[in-house]
Image (cartoon, grey):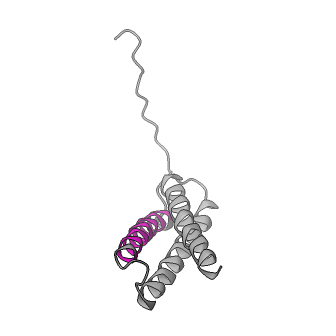
Amino acid sequence: MLFRKKRRIQFTDKKHPRQGIISSIMGAVAIIALLMLFIFSGRAKGHAGILFGYMGILDFILAVAGFVMAIRCIKQEEIYYTTVRIGVVSNGIVGLCLLVLYIVGLA
């Protein structure tokens, strides 16, 4: 009790950017869609068909769009970077996974 930390209230003009929030949501949707594609393709034992390929391409486009949106948002000043970082990481991981999957599929 003697050495407890004082909580300081800091008033700033920082805010969560709208593009960062949207990018984070797009990342979450892309991760869920990727997991669903993996699960349903696994249940079909790799013979899911062209529809799953198109859905994977759409998921890749969603991940790239969210990644670009988050990167553009990093250049802003006086913002909280939490949602921006979540958007960059989640969309980057999904995009990288789908890109690797595409390259392995070509080989």
Magenta stretch?
20-41
Instruction: Pick the residue in front: 38 or 54.
Output: 38
Compared across the picture, whether 22 is left or right of 93 comes to left
Which residue is depicted at the point 53% across and 80% down? 61
Name the residue at the top extreme: 2
Residue 22 painted magenta: yes
* For residue 8, above or below residue 60: above
Which residue is depicted at the point 52% across and 71% down? 66
Q: Quadrant of residue 28?
A: bottom left
**Position in image of residue 11 (x %, y %):** 46, 41
How many numbered dots are placed on residues in this image? 0
Which residue is depicted at the point 46% across and 37% down? 10
**Position in image of residue 96 (x %, y %):** 59, 67
User: Magenta span: helix, strand or loop, mainly?
Assistant: helix
Instruction: Pick the residue in front: 13 or 84.
Output: 84
Which residue is depicted at the point 40% across and 68% down? 35
Name the residue at the bottom extreme: 50
Q: Quadrant of residue 64?
A: bottom right
